[in-house]
Image: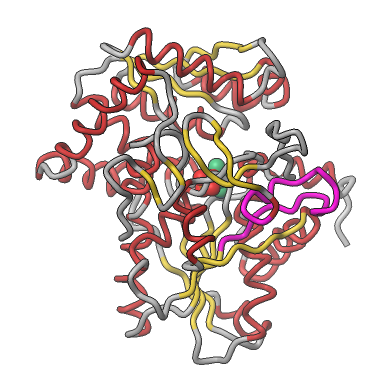
């Protein structure tokens, strides 16, 4: 596994660009995290919840029909969609909540855009009996009515943020201010492998269970490592979770699928690594979608979980070092892949995960029958059925 330097830099990316008050809070969190993750009773407790609450290990499924139809590499699907709450996000929230509990915190705060991280956070707060406050842009609250209600069912308080564009960016600002003001009893839960040091490392640590399981499962089934790993990239947590354990295995190629939205030539996309430039967002350095004047560009994707204008620092580093390749998938390609996997294997993937499936549809036929692709199905698509219904006007041929 790749390790950042002492200051949390992955090459030139990452680090911690935050006010001094927050810097102190993050330094002590970092120390606590590195100590705790070495403790056997912490590891045992985490393993128990991952097994009995989340439902791990998630299966590695050989997609035989898809493999036959595409006529190339053998395709395996890592079924993160089968986790409790329907995606990989719970791996991270269970881990961070246990950490917060060990640190004696009684309240968890988080921000959410599409609402998926908010729901995963509210879930573990209910589980561990912690107070939960979710900051959400007023505009996002309007767009994600049902997820807001889910959070409330789970006992969370959802606080509307009205400043600026009233979306994710402002919600992050407010959450960070709250964190600094109340850090003695409050823990800030980040949802992807982004943010200032130590968050990208913490999130990678909790998500890297995905790749560790894949290694063991593919060795059992095939007796060799895969040739390709494919995952979608929003902030980059499910992808780094799949990739991390294979960093040193140079025969294993890694491909991240970014959302090209309506096309890279329009400004309606979120292909950060493919079309962005290095910059600083929310306290860390990464590839970033920017306007000509350097302002952060608004991100867009049909998959709400992918429309973030930044990306994890480790992916930014992998892009420059060439350790991973990043490709782009349009909304239309993702929707086609969503329908394809549903019809072919009886698995309705999340629209986010459909970006990874779309890349597999392109890649598999170019490879030989001896080669192996492992694709991460980061979440299930039930949540997206109504959106796809709307896009297709309720008609399927
Ligand atoms: C949130 C989400 C993503 C994107 O986040 P990453 O941090 O890039 O993994 C992808 N898939 C699903 C199902 C999600 O909910």
If the image is split into quadrants, where does the N terminus sit?
A: bottom left
Identified at 37% across, 49% down, the residue is 207
Nearer-the-camera pick, 202 or 304: 202
Q: Where's residue 292, x and y in %?
A: 77, 38
Q: Which residues are magenta?
A: 256-274
Percent of width and height locating residue 172: 53, 22
The residue that appears at 35% across and 15% down in the rendered structure is 21
Asked if residue 258 is among those painted magenta in the image, a careful observer would answer: yes
Q: Position of residue 342 (x, y in %)?
A: 67, 62
State whether residue 126 is above or below residue 106.
below
- Give the camera-side residue of 8 and 186: 8
The residue at 66%/84% (across/down) is 365
In percent of the image, x 32 and y 18: which residue is there? 130
Q: Please tell me whether residue 172 is drawn above or below residue 321 in the rendered image.
A: above
Horizontally, is 145 left or right of 33 in the view? Answer: right
**Residue 357 placed where, x, y %?**
63, 65
Q: How is the image coloured?
A: secondary structure
Residue 298: say if magenta: no
Q: Quadrant of the C terminus?
A: bottom right
In the depicted structure, whether residue 213 falls above or below residue 182: below
């Amino acid at each position: 596994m790749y390790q950042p330097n002492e200051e949390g830099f992955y090459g030139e990316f990452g680090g911690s660009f935050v006010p001094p008050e927050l810097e102190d809070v993050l330094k002590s969190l970092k120390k606590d995290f590195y100590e705790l993750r070495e403790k056997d009773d912490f590891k045992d407790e985490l393993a128990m919840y991952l097994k009995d609450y989340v439902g791990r290990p998630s299966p590695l499924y050989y997609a035989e029909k898809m493999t036959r139809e595409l006529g190339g590499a053998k395709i395996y699907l890592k079924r993160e969609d089968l986790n409790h709450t329907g995606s990989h996000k719970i791996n991270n929230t269970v881990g961070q909540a246990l950490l917060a509990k060990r640190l004696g915190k009684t309240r968890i705060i988080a921000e959410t855009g599409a609402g998926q991280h908010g729901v995963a956070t509210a879930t573990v707060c209910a589980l561990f009996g912690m107070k939960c406050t979710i900051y959400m842009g007023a505009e996002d609250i309007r767009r994600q009515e049902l997820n807001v209600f889910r959070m409330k069912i789970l006992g969370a308080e959802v606080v509307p943020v009205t400043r600026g564009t009233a979306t994710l960016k402002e919600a992050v600002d407010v959450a960070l201010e709250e964190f600094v003001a109340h850090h003695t009893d409050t823990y800030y839960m980040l949802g992807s492998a982004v943010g200032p040091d130590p968050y990208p490392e913490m999130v990678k640590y909790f998500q890297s269970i995905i790749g560790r399981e894949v290694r063991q499962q593919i060795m059992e089934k095939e007796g060799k490592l895969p040739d390709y790993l494919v995952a979608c990239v929003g902030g980059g947590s499910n992808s780094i979770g799949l990739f991390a354990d294979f960093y040193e295995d140079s025969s294993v190629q890694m491909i991240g699928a970014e959302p090209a939205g309506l096309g890279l030539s329009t400004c309606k996309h979120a292909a950060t690594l493919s079309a962005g430039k290095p910059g600083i967002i929310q306290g860390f350095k990464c590839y970033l979608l920017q306007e000509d004047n350097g302002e952060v560009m608004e991100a867009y994707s049909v998959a709400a979980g992918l429309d973030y204008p930044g990306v994890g620092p480790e992916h930014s580093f992998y892009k420059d070092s060439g350790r991973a390749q990043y490709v782009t998938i349009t909304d239309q390609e993702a929707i086609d892949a969503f329908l394809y996997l549903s019809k072919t294997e009886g698995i309705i993937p999340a629209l986010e995960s459909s970006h990874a499936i779309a890349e597999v549809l392109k890649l598999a036929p170019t490879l030989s029958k001896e080669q192996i692709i492992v694709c991460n199905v980061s979440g299930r698509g039930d949540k997206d059925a109504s959106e796809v219904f709307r896009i297709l006007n309720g008609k399927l041929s």
